[in-house]
Image (cartoon, rainbow, N blue to C red):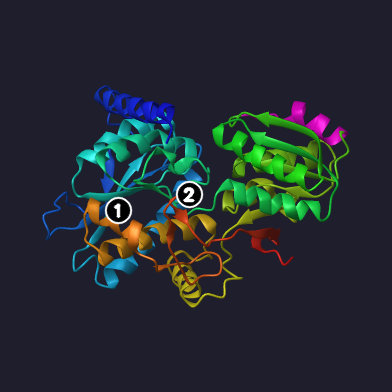
Amino acid sequence: MTINKKLRATLAAFVAAATLVGVSACGLGGSSSSGSSDNSGSGPVNIGVIYPKTGQYAEYGRLFEQGFDLAVKHVNADGGIKGRKLGLKYFDTQSDPKQDAAVAPKLVADKSIIAVVGDYASPASSAASPTFQTAGLVHYGFNNSSPTFTESGDHVWTPQIGQDKYQAKIADFIATKYKKIAVTYIENDWGKQAFQYFKAEADKKGVQIAYSSSYLADSTDLSPILIPARDSKPDAVVDIGYGPDGALVLNTLRDKLGYTGPYFGGQETKEFLDLAGKNAEGSIITGSFSATGTKDKKAQQFVKDFNAAYGNNPGNFEVTAYQAIIDLAYAANKTEPTRAGIQKALQTVTDFPLYQGNGGTFKFDQKTRRADNIDPILLIAKNGAFEQYEE
C-alpha cells in the first residue's frame, strides 16, 4: 500500500470513530439472531452483517438475508462452530458510505463478533474497511467486485469476482457479435471504474464505443442521455449499473425511444425483472452462478434447500450471501472462533467449499485476498427468469 493510501485509511478510521459519537441509533442499531454478546467460549459465535435492510437497495438486502439465514440454519444443524451456535448481528446501513463508516466502530466494540460481512455496494463497504482493518477484525466483502476493494489492508477479503473480469467477459462476448455500441454507466466510483475496465477490453477487441454517458443513481428520466445513444445507431446498448437503473435504461429505450436492438444490462433480481417486464426478455448480464445450470452436487442441494425454504430458485445475490457465511463458519471450525482465528484460516486454508462457478473448492490468492478460481458466466433473461447462456 502506498503512503497516500495508508494516510487515507488512517484518516477514514479516525473519522468513522468520531462520527459515531453524534449518530442516532435509528437505522444503525444491530438486530441479532443470536441474542448474546458473550464470546467467552460457551455462548453463540456471531458474525456482523452490514447491509441495506431499507433504502433504495433494500431488494438486495432482502436477497442477502435469505442466503445468510439459510446458511446459519445449515451450519447450526451440522454442529455449529466447534459445538457453539452461530448467530448473526444485522446492521441496516442502506448501503450508504456515511452510515457504514458510522456503524463500523459499533461492530468493532462488540467482542462477540468474530468477522463482518457486507455491504452491498463497494463504495459503502470501503468506507467501513479502514475501521475493521485497524481493529484486526476481518471484513469479508462478499459482494464487492471493485478490484481495489481489498487495498484497505490485510484483514479485508472477498470471494467476489472483480469487475475487471466481469467487464472483460461481457466485452469479449460482445466483440464476437457487434462492432459498434453505446454504453451508459452509473455515476459512482464503482460504475466509473467498471466502465474503464469495459472500455479497455472493448478497445482491445476492436469494438467501437460510438457513445457513452454516466447518470446519477437517483435519476428518473434518462431520455436526455439515451436519445443520443439511440441516434448513434449502435449494434447493441450496454448499461453498467444496478438493477433499477438497468430497468430504467431499458424501458426508456424500448418504450419511449423505439430502440429494438440487443441490450446488455440489469441484474438477476425479481426487482429488475418486475420493473422491466416484457422488455427484460433477452437481456444478457454476467454472473457467477446458475441455479438451473450448476453441476456441483452441493450447489444443487443448496438450490433444493433454498427452494424448500423460500419457494423459488436462488440467484447470484442469494448464493454469494450463503457462501459468505459458510466460508467464515468453515474458517472458524478449521482454526478457532475468534477474530485471529478467522484471519489465520483465510491465510492458510486451501479447501473452502465453493458453490459458485464450477463448484469444487477454492483458496484465497494471498496477494489480492480474492478467491483464486471463480470465473464469470453469462446469464440471459427468458420467460421471466435468468438462465445460463450457452455460448
Q: Quadrant of the C terminus?
A: bottom right
Nearer the observer: mark 1 or 2; the answer is 1
Classify 74 as above or below 106: below
Segment tinted magenta in the rendering: 219-231
Residue 151 screen position, x and y as percent: 44, 40
Image point (32%, 28%), residue name: 16
Quarter of the rendering containing residue 365: bottom left
Residue 324 screen position, x and y as percent: 40, 57
**Mark with earlier residue (1, 2):** 2
Crowd tier of the residue under label 2, counting other residues whose Cα lies within 10 Å: few below 14, some 14–19, many 20 or above:
many
Image point (54%, 60%), residue name: 315
Residue furthest to the front in view is: 2
- Tell which of 238 and 350 is nearer to you: 350
Q: Which residue is mark 2?
A: 143
Residue furthest to the bottom in view is: 297
Under tag 2, what secondary structure?
loop
Residue 24 screen position, x and y as percent: 28, 27
Magenta region's main secondary structure?
Answer: helix
Q: Is residue 225 magenta?
A: yes
Residue 278 screen position, x and y as percent: 73, 52
Q: Which residue is mark 1?
A: 343
- Tell which of 119 and 304 is nearer to you: 119
Under tag 1, what secondary structure?
helix
Q: Is residue 217 magenta?
A: no
Residue 61, labelled with which disc? none
Disc 2 marks a residue whose amino acid type is Asn
Image point (57%, 31%), residue name: 188
